[in-house]
Image: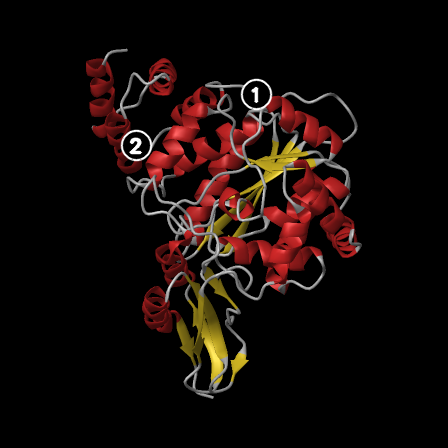
């Protein structure tokens, strides 16, 4: 396909026309081989953002992206191959404790994850804050680790879904992230390449989600569930609120610390509850439990047993982490050079803790990306975040900022004041 031919496709989509499966397959192939430049693909992404895609177009885009590289194939055995994917949020670290929990529940979990998009944190960015942890793996190593340890959390290999690898980064810097067709194709192309038996989707809604309203989130969930099931993967979706950060931390290393607390039975309730809910649905989807109530009990019992915490260490060791260095880093109260606290100026009940403002502050502290080339600072972020409904006294900590220097800490503190509302006590 020449550049002029692709230009005509951009124009067709810009004008609201439907692209054929063959055209979609061809332009995905051409993009992967470098024959279509980023600037033209950016124009196509924007056309799709505004004009949308039909269900057949989304299916064609998804399968073309999946087939742009290798697909995982696991030996036949009794353990189902499953995964969970979140559409992203602030403080959303569910994948970290969930993967070892699922492995302990008798699943194989090839969790192919991504980096941060917009203000949402990326699972790979979080894991790379662990000393020595490797997120780049070959297909052969992924399969070997899943078979032996039971779980892996890693990035796409060079040979797995290369189309999405390029488009994922391009969407982040072109304002085309919140597009149902593009999100659907991005998520499902990676998940279908994992050779899954079942998939659980955590679709976020709220001020810090790609889908701001519950209705939009439901549309995205329906799109992905329909396409996933049509492709032979038992797919289910849950909707969860992202008006408030999940847990009490936001920022890569701080979220790893909180994930370990969850595995040790002392993390925040909202994180623990969502981890258990995700595991329970996969137990139900694969016939390992006969009711959601029994599945919730089964998952909660396993999480409390301590086995997933040990499995976490097994996964870290398998992916190159140095456990002694990891434990030493966990022991530090903060690994950032500067910390400062936002304190309540009056007593009362927390009415609002705005996840979008917090996500933007963490990104601007260095914990997220403004461009494809941004270098992540793993140690910045926030912890001790107060949640809506909690009573606070004058002088109580509403959040603690971890920053690279005093100036960025002061800037963040001033902005953070607008994230909280406290009723008169």
Return the x and y of residue 292 as percentages of the image width and height.
72, 49
Q: Is residue 28 left or right of residue 157?
A: left
**SS at circle 2:** helix
Quadrant housing the N terminus: top left
Residue at which label 1 appears:
71
Instruction: Please give the name of the residue rendered at 44% of the width and 24% of the height, measured from the top-left corner.
Output: 162
Q: Nearer the viewer, residue 53 or 131?
A: 131
User: Would you say residue 273 is visible in this rendering?
Assistant: no
How many labels, in total? 2
Instruction: Please give the name of the residue rendered at 54% of the width and 36% of the height, measured from the top-left corner.
Output: 225
Q: Nearer the viewer, residue 106 or 39?
A: 39
Separation of residues labelled 1 and 2 (CA atoms): 25 Å
Where, by quadrant of the figure, is residue 36 drawn?
Answer: top left
Question: What colouring method underlies this structural image?
Answer: secondary structure
Return the x and y of residue 17 as percentages of the image width and height.
26, 24
Q: Callout 2: 10 Å neighbours few (<14), some, many (20+)?
A: many
Question: Could you tell which of marks 1 and 2 lies nearer the N-terminus?
Answer: 2
**SS at circle 1:** loop
Q: Callout 1: 10 Å neighbours few (<14), some, many (20+)?
A: some
User: Would you say residue 48 is visible in this rendering?
Assistant: yes
Return the x and y of residue 422 as percentages of the image width and height.
43, 79
Q: Is residue 29 above or below residue 230?
A: above
- The mark found on residue 379 in the picture is none
Number of the front mark, 1 or 2: 1
Q: Nearer the viewer, residue 157 or 218?
A: 157
Q: Are marks 1 and 2 in contact (CB under 8 Å)?
A: no
- The mark found on residue 45 in the picture is 2
Q: Is residue 249 above or below residue 292?
A: below
Return the x and y of residue 413 as percentages of the image width and height.
37, 71
Instruction: Please give the name of the residue rendered at 51% of the width and 82% of the height, measured from the top-left corner.
Output: 392
């Amino acid at each position: 396909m020449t550049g002029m031919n692709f230009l005509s496709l951009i124009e067709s989509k810009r004008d609201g026309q439907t692209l054929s499966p063959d055209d979609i397959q061809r332009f995905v192939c051409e993009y992967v081989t470098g024959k279509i430049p980023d600037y033209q693909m950016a124009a196509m992404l924007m056309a799709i953002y505004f004009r949308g895609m039909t269900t057949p177009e989304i299916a064609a885009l998804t399968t073309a992206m999946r087939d742009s590289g290798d697909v995982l194939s696991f030996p036949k055995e009794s353990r189902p191959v499953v995964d969970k994917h979140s559409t992203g949020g602030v403080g959303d670290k569910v994948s970290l404790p969930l993967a070892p929990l699922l492995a302990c529940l008798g699943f194989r979990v090839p969790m192919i994850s991504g980096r941060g998009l917009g203000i949402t944190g990326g699972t790979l960015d979080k894991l790379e804050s662990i000393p020595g942890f490797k997120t780049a793996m070959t297909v052969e190593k992924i399969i070997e680790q899943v078979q032996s340890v039971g779980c892996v959390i890693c990035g796409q290999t060079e040979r797995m879904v290369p189309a999405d690898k390029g488009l994922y980064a391009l969407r982040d810097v072109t304002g085309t992230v919140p597009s149902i067709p593009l999100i659907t194709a991005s998520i499902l192309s990676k998940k279908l390449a994992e050779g899954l038996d079942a998939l659980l989707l955590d679709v976020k809604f709220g001020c810090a989600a790609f889908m701001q309203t519950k209705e939009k989130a439901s549309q995205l969930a329906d799109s992905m569930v329909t396409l996933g099931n049509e492709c032979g993967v038992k797919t289910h979706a849950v909707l969860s609120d992202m008006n408030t950060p999940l847990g009490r931390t936001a920022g890569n290393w701080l979220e790893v610390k909180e994930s370990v607390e969850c595995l040790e039975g002392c993390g925040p309730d909202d994180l623990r509850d969502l981890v258990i809910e995700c595991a329970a649905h996969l137990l139900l989807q694969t016939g390992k439990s006969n009711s959601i109530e029994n599945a919730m009990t089964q998952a909660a019992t396993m999480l409390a047993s301590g086995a997933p915490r040990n499995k976490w260490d097994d996964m870290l060791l398998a992916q190159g982490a140095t456990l002694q260095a990891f434990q030493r880093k966990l022991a530090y109260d903060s690994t950032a050079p500067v910390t400062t606290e936002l304190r309540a100026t009056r007593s009362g009940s927390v009415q609002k803790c705005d996840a979008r403002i917090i996500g933007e502050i963490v990104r601007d502290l260095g914990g997220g990306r403004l461009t494809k080339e941004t270098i992540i600072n793993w140690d910045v972020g926030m912890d001790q975040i107060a949640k809506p409904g909690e009573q606070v006294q004058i002088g109580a900590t509403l959040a603690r900022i971890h920053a690279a220097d005093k100036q960025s800490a002061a800037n963040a503190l001033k902005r953070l004041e607008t994230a909280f509302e406290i009723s008169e006590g």
